[in-house]
Image: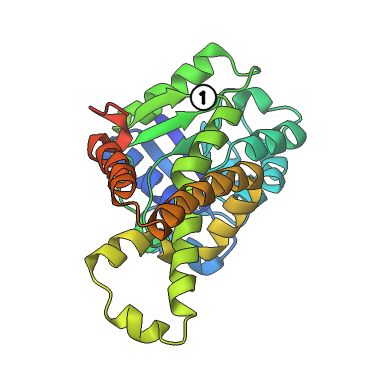
Amino acid sequence: MKYRRLALIGCGLMGGSFALALRRAGLVEHVAGFSASEGTRQKALKLGVIDSACASAVDAAQDADLVLLAVPVHATESTLRAIDPAISPNALVMDVGSTKGDVVAAARVALQRSLANFVPAHPIAGKEVAGIEHADAQLYRERQVILTPLRENPAERVLQAHQLWQALGSRVLELSPEAHDACFAAVSHLPHLTAFALVNAVARQPHGTKYLSMAGPGFRDFSRIAASDPCVWRDILLANRDEVLHQSVLLREALHEFETTMAAGDADRLLAIIQEASQTRSRWRLGGADSDV
């Protein structure tokens, strides 16, 4: 399994890491890259992430047998529409978007001739820093990748996507777009929303700056993801708003339980609900490995 030409549309952390991982695995001969910013394209070229910088997404997609969209989720429809005429009949097309319902809907609108080529994907990997300069060939190793295949996808196309991500060291699962978005609203989108809210809640207090100066490892670990790319997370939270809002209600209910227990001075109940969380977290393992949860 070797690809002659990867069209990398979006030369940032996720796309750049995919290209580097393919190179390290010896699975690609040429990487043609496009990003809206000329500066980013040139940086990707200089860093050796791509072999050629293209002036448009459609130029990158020409004659490619593998296409990866690593663009903001709100740009999926326009990007797919632009490249649809250039997608080769046997090309595998994937994305790395953190939401899938909107991506699938965008693909059904935009891909008039190449819908069967598109296998939506979400690698559960990333960093709190963005940009091609942070691309890492190891980013996807020992990480889960969720595929949400379309009914139009031939079985061999889905198998191809499985094998490609597995060759990069990832563990591959399949979900429906609806199940994906419900799951990741709970375990990814809500934690980011909570981290953003916590940092703002502390910083906006009259003595917030002083409080932050005294914060230790607990605050550092909890708030780390609040440093994530603001534009990316604006788009994700809006794209999956219904599921995230549902999870936000559940979080408020859990906080209310803590508040009422503390207000009542009920030490036994407080201990019990803390222990429940502690035990659940102790059993949890990244990627579901060896976890009872």
Q: How many marks?
A: 1
Q: Tell me which corner region of the image, top left, top right, bottom left or bottom right, holds residue 225.
A: bottom left
Residue lying at 45% horizontally and 21% vertically, measured from the top left: 160
Expressed as whole percent of the image width and height from the top left, the position of residue 164 reads 39, 27
* Circle 1 residue: 175
- The answer, for residue 127, to whether it is visible in the render is yes
Q: In this view, does 196 lie above or below 165?
A: below
Question: What amino acid is at disc 1?
Answer: Leu
Q: Nearer the viewer, residue 241 or 263?
A: 263
188 lies left or right of 80: left
Q: Nearer the viewer, residue 217 or 103?
A: 217
- Density class for disc 1 (Cα within 10 Å; few <14, some 14-19, many ≥20) is some
Quadrant (top left, top right, bottom left, bottom right) of the C terminus: top left
Q: Nearer the viewer, residue 173 or 282?
A: 282
Residue lying at 33% horizontally and 59% vertically, measured from the top left: 222
Q: Tell me which corner region of the image, top left, top right, bottom left or bottom right, holds residue 97.
A: top right
Query: From this viewpoint, which residue is outermost toward the top?
Result: 155
Quadrant (top left, top right, bottom left, bottom right) of the N terminus: top left
Q: Is residue 210 above or below residue 111?
A: below
- The answer, for residue 228, to whether it is visible in the render is no
Residue lying at 57% horizontally and 24% vertically, measured from the top left: 176
181 lies left or right of 85: left
Expressed as whole percent of the image width and height from the top left, the position of residue 125 reads 37, 45
Expressed as whole percent of the image width and height from the top left, the position of residue 5 reads 47, 37
